[in-house]
Image (cartoon, coloured by chain):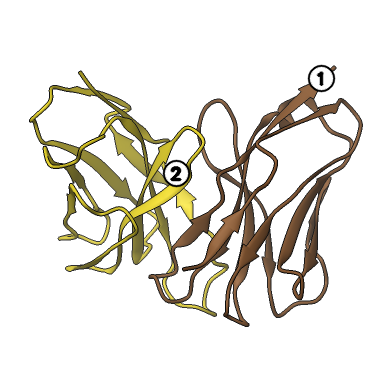
Chain colours: A yellow, B brown
Amino acid sequence: DGGITQSPKYLFRKEGQNVTLSCEQNLNHDAMYWYRQDPGQGLRLIYYSQIVNDFQKGDIAEGYSVSREKKESFPLTVTSAQKNPTAFYLCASSISGWRTNTGELFFGEGSRLTVL
Amino acid sequence: AQTVTQSQPEMSVQEAETVTLSCTYDTSESDYYLFWYKQPPSRQMILVIRQEAYKQQNATENRFSVNFQKAAKSFSLKISDSQLGDAAMYFCAYKVPNSGYALNFGKGTSLLVTP
């Protein structure tokens, strides 16, 4: 079945360590996104990529990094510079273009990161 | 920056009754998309309904319908004949044309459905 796979579902990290969250999609979507979800804060955009080898910062990019070497993959690295990394992270994808698609984002099941 | 406001952190409805969740947004764009997403306890985000701003007709999907008031920048979600499975967080979202088509989300409304 087509969809978005995030791994791991749960991750524990010690302070000062970098961690990488995986996001893979087989929907043949050009655009991919990373959101962070905190209680009472909704979803906030970290990074997005509209095409391979290109990505842009979202609203809260500080302390995070991404890469887009393949169309189907968009991993997120949470670096030690991120002051409050404990959160739920959601990856999403969509067809690019304004009028050529329905505008819908398709989401993975999320990854819960806890810093000990 | 565009903002999406959901003024009701929590709502409650009895089974089989109707509930309306509010959403307002701020934008200078004339062409955009609006969405309601549902996030049940599993935390999987599910699209409930979508509205295109250039369409005047309110979108409907089975028991879910919207009241889209473009001039007032209001986009409320009505759930009719509420079911226990409707209990979830509901997020209103606005599609930003100049940020890689990312969605800008409100903070969410937690809906409780009582028997």
Tag 2 and tag 1, C-beta contact below 8 Å: no
Vertical position of residue A102 compared to residue B41: above or below: below
**Residue at point 76% right, 70% down?**
B72
Q: Amino acid at mark 1?
A: Thr
Q: Quadrant of residue B26?
A: bottom right
Give me the chain letter of mark 1. B
Residue at image location 81% in from the left, 19% down from the top: B114
Q: Which dot marks residue A16?
A: none
Q: In this rendering, would A74 be left or right of A95? A: left
Q: Quadrant of the N terminus of chain A?
A: top left
Q: Secondary structure at mark 1?
A: strand
Residue at (57% x, 79% y) in the render: B28
* Quadrant, the C terminus of chain A: top left
**Do we see residue A2 in this rendering?**
no
Image height check: is A47 above or below A116?
below
Q: Which residue is mark 2?
A: A1
Disc 1: which residue: B114
Q: Amino acid at mark 2?
A: Asp
Q: Position of residue A115 (x, y in %)?
A: 22, 24
Say above or below: B25 vs A5. Answer: below
| Residue at figure coordinates x 39%, y 70% from the top left | B99
Instruction: Specify whether A45 is left or right of B3.
Output: left
From the viewer's side, name the closer residue of B9 and B83: B9
* Residue B52 coordinates in the image, percent (x, y): 67, 72
